[in-house]
Image (tube, rainbow, N blue to C red):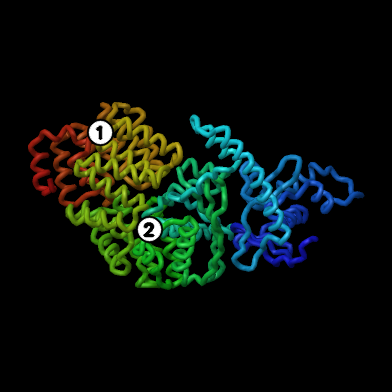
Amino acid sequence: MPDSSPRPPVIRFGVFEVDLRSGELRKGGLKIKLQEQPFQILTMLLERPGEIITREEIEKKLWSADTFVDFEHSLATAVKKLREALDDSADNPRFVETLPRRGYRFIAPLDVGAGLALPTRAQQAAPLRRRWLAAVAGGALVAVLAALFGVNVTGVRDRLLRAVGAVREPPLQIRSLAVLPLENLSHDPEQEYFSDGMTDALITDLGKISTLRVISRRTAMHYRGTKKTLPEIARELNVDAVVEGAVLRSGDRVRITAQLIEARADKQLWAEGYERDLRDVLALQSEVARAIANGSKIKISPDEETRLTTTRPVNPEAYKAYLKGLYYQQKYTEEAMRLGRKYFEQAIQRDPNYALAYLGLSGSYLHSARLQLLPGDEVSAKTRAAAMKALELDETLVGAHSILGYVLDRYEWDSLGAEREFKRALELGPNDAGAHADYANYLAERGRHEEAIAEVKRAEELDPLSTGGARAAWVYYIARRYDQAIEQLRRVLEAQPRFAFAHSVLGEAYVQKGMYEEAVVEFQQAMTLTPGSPWPLTELGNAYAVAGKRGEALKILAQLKQRLSRGAYVSPYDMAVLCTGLGEKTQAFEWLEKARSKRAEGFYWVRVDPRLDTLRSDPRFQDLLRRMNFPP
């Protein structure tokens, strides 16, 4: 007898929901256009989840006997449109499975946590009967197999038992995952910063869990708009699970939907939607992160639980300004850095106790110094002050400890204090690729190459397509492993061809290998990608000098001196490197003295930089190192 239980008016699965009253399919609360026939097919599938809906049933319901249509073509078209609406794939389905010549089946779990669709009594009974019959048949077969294979010769018995289902594969334990860029459901490019910021926050919160390896934001962003399937992405990143979802902001309300997919089986483990006032967005982010961790069956320590649950309300305008600052800061151009600082300062004005805004401002100053857009000795105090204020408000901020370690190391030459901050950053953020890379650089500066390589490999695991891979290559370069650096950088640039730092380091490695033409190409590419920054130009000049193109190198030296005469900034350390390449030792030492007195960007590499090898036997170089008071 057919089940007469009333169906719930709204059925949810993953980030989708079907409203049976209005005949609407929605994703993250936003209506998705779907024609009548694909919607009716979806309704039929949802009425009997897990069961085959035959082609004959669909034909009978959707196309009457007196209607002349090309049924095969019409059905294929309708199912294709349904899959497009669900972002599903026929080859690797997550929702609608095709059974050739038979029909279709809905294979995703439905949300039963909020009065949503449950299996009918008939549906519950049918699988029970099938399981009973399977158990009888399986038991008989197992008995036969046991008689035949009393001795498990070369594992034949186990393979046969596994094939018939008598031995089940153990459930996969989630130890690593990637959070894909959350979809901006407003489809307004002006709101892209908001969905990117929410993605970043989710990765940061999950990264606080020490038992879970979480791929960095920069690598995850490479998969925005990808056509690759989730299992393909998981294989490329070597992760057990993938999180995908969507964000919609309307006024001061924000809605986020997310689902956790086990990559091996392409199986949904958890899905949920949340809606909050923008003031509570930090609590919302932490709640989603905890739900994902619970769905992954990950153990969270009491300290990690505290860090995930300790949040405070935030001024909505301050939060939006902070996300805009973050969006621009990650573009790494002079104008973007300026805009980033402006928005972080706006966020602080709106909410003077907003720790993340101070962290953003600190990072903006530091990036500007790294790109040589501002002198390090001028911004180090501002960088430190903002980082210290962020830690005063929230001692658990990984980035603030890492930035403070950077300042202590490279501008204040406090080696012990720097290492203390780097280790604290890693304690709080074991999945922070930047923290691992910064500590690796600290170790490399001191010639602790094996420790540095071990640390940077961890950064690379977390950030394989972006800064992790390039920073790993820089550590290989400092350790004189040029072939390894080149191989690494080629992989990075294949995935991210517009990565200026990677082009620059590749050029340096080519110079050391005597591949000067290739080096010039890389430095010119870095210059194109960082307009207004002088460091690729000084590297190009050094490449010309070492290659014997003295005239070209002198032209660049004159160009840099002219830039200095106009009041623009050029690192005296880079000027020293260029003069070293030209063989102008006296000028090189003059620039090194200026670099020492100004705490110039790059000077901290003086002990290990291969470009200065021709100076090392000079007594003036040894005297310089003695006055640096480097620890042993």
Q: On the image, which quarter does residue 157 sit in?
A: top right
Instruction: Give left or right: position of 250 versus 537.
Output: right
Residue hosting label 2: 208
* Coordinates of residue 250 in the picture (x, y in percent): 56, 68
Indicate the quadrant containing the C terminus: top left, top right, bottom left or bottom right. top left
Check disc 2 and report its element: helix, strand or loop: loop
Q: Position of residue 365 (x, y in %)?
A: 31, 57
Counting residues from the N terminus, which is met first, the one under dot 2 or under dot 1? 2
- Name the foreground residue: 461 vs 35: 461
Looking at the picture, does residue 148 appear above or below residue 21?
A: above
Residue visible at 71% across and 61% down in the picture: 120
Viewer-side label of 2, 1: 2
Q: Amino acid at mark 2?
A: Lys
Q: CA distance from mark 2 to mark 1?
A: 34 Å
Residue 4 horizontal/vertical position (percent):
77, 65
Disc on res. 369: none
Does residue 492 appear left or right of residue 425 in this picture? right
Q: Are marks 2 and 1 in contact (CB under 8 Å)?
A: no
At 17% from the left edge and 54% from the top edge, which residue is drawn? 416
Residue type highlighted by circle 1: Arg
Check the image and name the residue furthest to the right. Answer: 66
Instruction: Tell me the tag on residue 480.
Output: 1
Q: Position of residue 151 (x, y in %)?
A: 50, 32
Q: Secondary structure at mark 1?
A: loop
Q: Nearer the viewer, residue 268 or 386?
A: 268
Q: Residues within 10 Å of mark 2 (few under 14, many from 20)?
A: many
Residue 559 can be seen in this image: no
